[in-house]
Amino acid sequence: MYKFKRQLAIIFLIAFIPSARAEIKSVKETMDGIVDRLYENLSEEELFSLTDEKIQSFITPEERKSLATQHVKFEVNVPVVVSVMHHKDQPVLPFWLKEAGFEKTDMTVVNDEDWVYEVWQKKFEPGPVNLGINGFDKHRQHYFVTVGALNEGDDLEITNIFPSQFSTEWMHEGAFVYHDWDSLLLKEVPRELFGHRLLTTIRGRAREAHLIGGFRKTRYPS
């Protein structure tokens, strides 16, 4: 009887131990929580003077993980190189880019507006690829992504793409990137990226984590 009660107690305790693999919140859920806490803890002046450094010191490790991994997600079936095209004039580099192991190359991509994007790359084994937010500053030239198989002859498949509503295209000169400006085309693309899969996006995604300069006074609060 004692042994039975002891086993029952152990089972009961295990049932209430939080899972080590608790689901990571979406960027939207995370940002909603951050904004609520900012309003609760910061003065109006502090809200209006937010910087990347101040935000980094305010968010929790769990929130940071969400913002570093839940903005763009997909899975690959073969070893790949993932390229992140980051607009070179963005004042602050997305915090997760170096932390995730991406390295800046000498390559650049240029579009018809002469926006220059630096190419950051990292190799991945088959499995999930998780990328982070564009930044806290609503920088409209949102980064974009290409994926290429590392081994010649591999048949690359990209699945479970998030967000799912945007198409994948072939990377080449003349390709479009932004669905909210689809006449804006790439005019200079390194040969090394030709034939990679391009994950299209919209510039509007820069709003999803907008905090710097994102607070306004109003006479009619909700």
Image: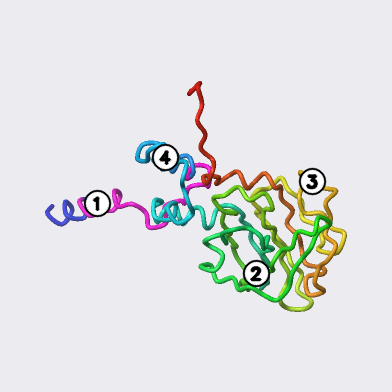
| 3D distance between C-alphas at marks 4 and 3 | 35 Å
* Category of crowding for the residue at label 1, using alpha-carbon neighbours closer than 10 angstroms: few (below 14), some (14–19), many (at least 20): few
Which numbered disc covers residue 209? none
For the point 51% across and 37% down, the residue is 215
Above or below, 129 against 72 in this view is below
Disc 1 to disc 2, C-alpha distance: 46 Å
Q: Percent x, y for residue 197?
A: 76, 63
Q: Which amino acid does label 4 sit on?
A: Glu
Q: Picture coordinates of residue 159 (x, y %)?
A: 68, 57
Q: Which numbered marker is on residue 181?
A: 3
The residue wearing badge 1 is 13
Q: Residue at x 29, y 48 (%)?
A: 16
**182 with respect to 10 (left or right):** right
| Foreground of the two, 10 or 27 | 27
Residue reaching furthest to the left: 2
Give yes or no for contact between labels 4 and 1 (Cβ–Cβ under 8 Å).
Answer: no
Q: How far is mark 4 from mark 1, CA to CA?
A: 47 Å
Name the kind of residue labelled 3 in the image. Trp
- Quadrant housing residue 121: bottom right
Dot 4 lies on which element? helix
Cα–Cα gap, marks 3 and 2? 23 Å
Query: In this rendering, which labeled residue sits more in front, label 1 or label 3?
Result: 3
Residue 86 quadrant: bottom right
Say which of marks 1 and 2 sits in front. 2
Q: Earlier in the sequence, mark 1 or mark 3?
A: 1
Q: Is mark 1 on a helix, strand or loop?
A: helix
| Residue for badge 2 | 120
From the image, tell me which residue sits under label 4.
45
Q: What stretch is highlighted in magenta?
A: 9-30
Q: Which amino acid does label 2 sit on?
A: Trp
Give coordinates of residue 37: x percent, y percent.
Answer: 39, 40
